[in-house]
Image (spheres, coloured by chain):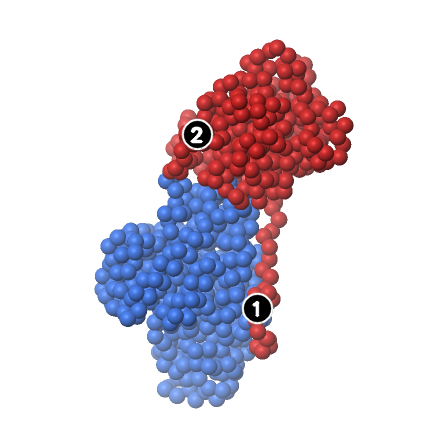
Amino acid sequence: MSPSATPTRRQIHPPPAPASLFPYHPGSLLSASDLTLPEISHILARATALENQDPLTRDRILAKRRVALLFYESSTRTRTSFELAAKGLGADTTLVSSLSSSIEKGETLKDTGLTLRALGAETIILRHNSSGAAWLLEAETRLPILNAGDGMHEHPTQALLDLRTILAHLDPATKARHPERDKGPVILSDRSAAQGVEGPASPAPTPPRIDQVTPETLSGVTVTIVGDILHSRVARSNMLLLPRLGARVLLCGPKELLPELAAQVGPGIEIERNFEAALRQSQVVMMLRIQAERLAGMQLDLEEYKANYQLTGPRLATQAPSAIVMHPGPIIRGLEVTAGVADGVQSVILEQVRNGVAIRMAVVERALLAANQQGARP
Amino acid sequence: MTALVIRGGHLIDPAAGVDGLKDILLKDGRVAEIAGPGKLKLTNGASGPDIQTIDATGLTVAPGLIDMHVHLREPGQGYKETIASGTAAAAAGGFTSVAAMPNTRPVNDSPEITRWMQAPEREAVVRVFPIAAATRGSKGEAINDFAALKSAGAVAVSDDGLPILKDSVMRETLAAAARVGLSVIQHAEDTRITHGSAWVASMNAGPTAFRLGLRGWPNEAESTIVERDIRLVQELRDARAHLHVAHISTAAALAAVRQARRNGLRVTCEVTPHHFLLTEEHVGLYSTNAKMCPPLRSAADRDAMLEAILDGVVDAIATDHAPHAVHEKEVEFENAPNGITGLETALGLSLRWLYNEGKLPLGRILSLLSAQPAALLNLKGRGTLTVGSFADVVVFDPKAEWTYNARQTRSKSRNTPFDGWAMQGKVRCTISEGRIAYVGG
């Protein structure tokens, strides 16, 4: 030991954080970033195949397999579509919600998960109000876990169904004419033509024309996510997923709901605070709900918010007349979007809902077929 | 009448300026004699079979380590730790004195609890020095009777776990503590920033917290409290108020401490091994053993901690040993309690990274782990090994490499991010006031 040398911190290189062991189970879907592009392609292809399959043969795929839905938060779309997806493949489903179970009596997530496993659950679909809950459940049960929304963190199946919706409106012919990146926007298919004369209450099926995704699939496409980014797991999952397919993600919202560091979540993400400016660049506009239940003491002037960020008919018509309008729901009509926009021809909100069933069939199938391969079935 | 001789070891006692081969005679809980190898006179009737000998050939002998920041969980939470189990872990880590924070159940804000913690019935194997609550119930409102707490054995006051937030209360605390010669240890966290109406920040604020969807604990919540406290110390300059910043974690707070010292103020600070080694990236995917308060910070802040240890701004290495039962940490990240254990890993990590990698002299590291905390807490006769001082000794092999296994801990809890980490410097023997408290392989 030579005491003469002046010590500096540069000589000390403490070990970096170890690589994550998650997901433990190949059937799990915890984060949108867990999926490779071939896996995404596979899920998209299976979603289409399962959607098109005869329901009478489809329900033999997972006949009598056991799927548990564990919901710590209320949900309409996600819960129902997961349930319909699992049942559509023939699985038995059981729903445990925090208000009608021993969770109310103080049972922990670990114990609830182990109990469901002991009851024969082969996969657990978890919706939880704490970020990271799905990782805890997977570590404790080692079952395939499908993250149906964890706190403010992620909602990967929503990002996948959003992707499927976007792909359905991506015109491959147009893309073919502009094969290089940054050669002008990709023009989305004509909405009124695609939907015919039917109203949004029963949207016409618009199957995606692309199910093999590459890093170029969404090149030239700008997706703007508007509103309460801070509290949104939908935003985070889309921010992690869409740029990997070449999309440019623009985030738009006030500072209270969209901190500057949001752009550092990953590559391909930018912030544009001016809503009109963001709209003008967008082929896809994804509106988010103001999450009153997570605002928790934040002072937010809703009138000012509406003035700056509400998607109104005139705004949409003048700034983004050919964009599609998405919303993960639930919609608060008259707050983030007007009723006219929600029901308008550019809206694909109900297509998103319908795509939820197809995508969730594919991820439930993936979870249980992976469980088969592992021999993990009890 | 027991006597112990430690022969053949290399004594490093930075406070006394000793760094060489020495034999030591310990008798009646004190250091009785120190001499060159084989030169002990063994006077005072210590002879023959009464003397137990420890062969320290090839080993380092040093003043027992002093951890000025631990949570022993008693009274009230014996399922996490007891004074007996916590001091056993301390002894295994080479510590002969630990200063126990008052956030027990109930809070240690009374002379009765302060005495209870030091009673022989607690079966401590090393010395426990209670740090009493600064305010009643650590609620940050009414200050306690510091004179009475000091007579009962309290060595400092703190509301650790919580800050003393109000300016007026902090000013009164600093002044009253100075009058009785105690330091005020501040848990610097502006809870008006880190606590929302329905949430509590659970990791460092920044891109990682945003990505993980976790509420962030910004650096300013620490540094603004430290800056406020330094202003109060400045105002109370004539009273010689002493502010000690617990578990400092941000470059900005360190800069404030550095400046205060240049201005001649009595402002000191401690840093934990986790804050000088780990970053927020170690939270990984919601590892609750990387959750503590203050949280793991950015790499820049972590590097500032290392820099400040090396350049001397940091006064002490303290562990903030905070045991929690396994079931308490096996929950959602946001719901998990703050804190990690640290008594058994502090020396091994310090030697591995500061001594082996950082080339910081062994004496400097031992000073940060013993002489300096002894001085900060005014522990007379500790942190040094001169004739007459307490026979608090650690004997360790500074070159031995080993791997920490949390399952073999002597603590009741094993919530550590350092499980499986390579350590350097194995404790062979810990002696507390002349009694062997730990013997290791």
Residue type, mark 1 in image: Thr
Q: Measuring 48% from the left and 37% from the top, which residue is drawn there?
A: A254
**Are tags 1 and 2 found on a single chain?**
yes
Where B89 falls versus A300 (above or below)?
A: below
- The reply to whether discs 1 and 2 touch (Cβ–Cβ < 8 Å) is no
Quarter of the image for the C terminus of chain B: give it: bottom right
Q: Residue furthest front?
A: A318
Q: Position of residue B79 (x, y in %)?
A: 39, 50
Q: CA distance from mark 1 to mark 2?
A: 53 Å
Pointer 1 or 2: first along the chain:
1
Front tag of 1 and 2: 1
Residue B78 is at least partly visible in this image:
no
Where B82 falls versus A118 (above or below)?
A: below
Q: Residue furthest top?
A: A197
Question: What chain letter is assigned to the residue under label 1?
Answer: A
The residue pinned by badge 2 equals A98
Where A183 falls versus A81 (above or below)?
A: below
The residue pinned by badge 1 equals A8
Residue type, mark 2 in image: Ser
Question: What chain letter is assigned to the residue under label 2?
Answer: A
**Front-most of residues B299 and B20:** B299
Chain letter, colour red in render:
A
Q: Position of residue A294 (x, y in %)?
A: 43, 35
Chain letter, colour blue in render:
B
Q: In the figure, is residue A107 to the left or right of A311? A: left
**Front-most of residues B328 and A344:** A344
Q: Measuring 36% from the left and 86% from the top, which residue is drawn there?
A: B44
Q: Measuring 66% from the left and 16% from the top, which residue is drawn there?
A: A194
